[in-house]
Every structure is written in structure tokens, then in C-alpha cells.
């Protein structure tokens, strides 16, 4: 199967976004930066950044400065599967800086890109073979913005009255 590389459309902030993301994720780097050539239509001008190739923990991405025509929406998000609460809190804290929290571990960063910060233990609890436990975990998660695994576990383990 051919390699798939997500391309993110920005309105002039592609390089800043790539630098921000590579400062958050381990094993990340900025690759090629291409620039607009002469005779560009406004507001672009010669020398402005066109694309930035970058890698986040081994996954390649391209950031494109395409203009204001296509803003980000929650219709597409990037899910970060985290090993534990500490790792989830790291990504939640860094990605919400200048952005906004949403529900159930979703957030929108300062560039408008949507992310889901998901501890792997959450998925185990939501798919518990005991349907009552899974339901209690789901109900607890639905009340949260940032996922709190200890609180979800308490709810899942609670004995119904």
C-alpha cells in the first residue's frame, strides 16, 4: 500500500504549526520547506512558505499555506493513543495552549486542528466484557473534557445501587 501523508491546509501559519507540533511530540523533525516563487497572487508573495514537510514520532505530514478558503473543522481529527495519564496530560496541556478544550478528550489547538487525546486504558474500559462496567465508564467519560483515567476507573468499578 502506498504511504499516506496527511496534508494540513493553513492560512499562513504552516511553519509555525510544524515547529509547534515537533516541539511536543518525541522523535519529530522539520524536513523540507518550500517557498512561493515570483508572480504569486495576493496575499501570497515570493519567498513566503508554501509547504513544510515534518514528522511527528515517525509519521510524516505536510503543512500547506493555501489561504483562508478551507478552515479546519472537527470533521477530521488526529487521535493520540497514550500509554498512561501522564502522557495524556502532556499532550492535553501542550495542545490546548492557546486552543480550546472540547468534550471526551477532544480539543482544538491554537491553529484550529482537532485532536483526540486518548489513554489506551480508556479503550479497554469502554470495551469491557462486563456491559455494566463499560456503560459506567462511558457515562463518566461523557462528562469529561480532559480524560481522567482514575475517575473513569472509579466510576466503572462502582457498585450500582
Image: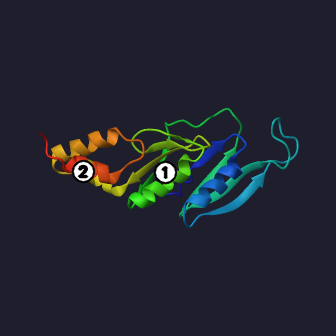
For label 1, the SS is helix
Count the numbered circles shown.
2
Q: Quadrant of the C terminus?
A: top left
Q: Residue furthest left?
A: 161
Question: Is 35 on the left-hand or right-hand side of 61?
Answer: right
The quarter of the displayed image where residue 39 is located: top right
Q: Residues within 10 Å of mark 1 (few under 14, many from 20)?
A: many
List x then y, in percent, for residue 122. Answer: 32, 52
The quarter of the displayed image where residue 67 is located: top right
Q: Residue at x 81, y 40 (%)?
A: 44
Q: CA distance from mark 2 to mark 1?
A: 21 Å
List x then y, in percent, for residue 96. Answer: 54, 46
Question: Is 85 on the left-hand or right-hand side of 133?
Answer: right
Q: Which residue is mark 2?
A: 154
Question: Is 83 on the left-hand or right-hand side of 90?
Answer: left
Q: Which residue is mark 1?
A: 92
The answer to which of marks 2 and 1 sits earlier in the sequence is 1
Q: Residues within 10 Å of mark 2 (few under 14, many from 20)?
A: few
As rendered, which of 77 and 161 lies closer to the eye?
A: 161
List x then y, in percent, for residue 15. Answer: 70, 52
Q: Residue furthest top?
A: 69
Question: Is 2 on the left-hand or right-hand side of 124?
Answer: right
List x then y, in percent, for residue 62. Answer: 63, 52
Amino acid at each position: 500500500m502506498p504511504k499516506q501523508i496527511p496534508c494540513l491546509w493553513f492560512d499562513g501559519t504552516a511553519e509555525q504549526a510544524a515547529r509547534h507540533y515537533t516541539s511536543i511530540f518525541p522523535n519529530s523533525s522539520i524536513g523540507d520547506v518550500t517557498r512561493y516563487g515570483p508572480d504569486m497572487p495576493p496575499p501570497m508573495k515570493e519567498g513566503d512558505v508554501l509547504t513544510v514537510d515534518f514528522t511527528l514520532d515517525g509519521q510524516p505530514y505536510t503543512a500547506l499555506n493555501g489561504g483562508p478558503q478551507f478552515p479546519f473543522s472537527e470533521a477530521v481529527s488526529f487521535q493520540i493513543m497514550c500509554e498512561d495519564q501522564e502522557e495524556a496530560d502532556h499532550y492535553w496541556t501542550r495542545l490546548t495552549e492557546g486552543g480550546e478544550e472540547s468534550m471526551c478528550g477532544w480539543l482544538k489547538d491554537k491553529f484550529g486542528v482537532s485532536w483526540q487525546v486518548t489513554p489506551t486504558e480508556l479503550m479497554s474500559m469502554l470495551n469491557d466484557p462486563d456491559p455494566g462496567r463499560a456503560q459506567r465508564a462511558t457515562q463518566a467519560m461523557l462528562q469529561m473534557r480532559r480524560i481522567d483515567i482514575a475517575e473513569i476507573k472509579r466510576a466503572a468499578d462502582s457498585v450500582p445501587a
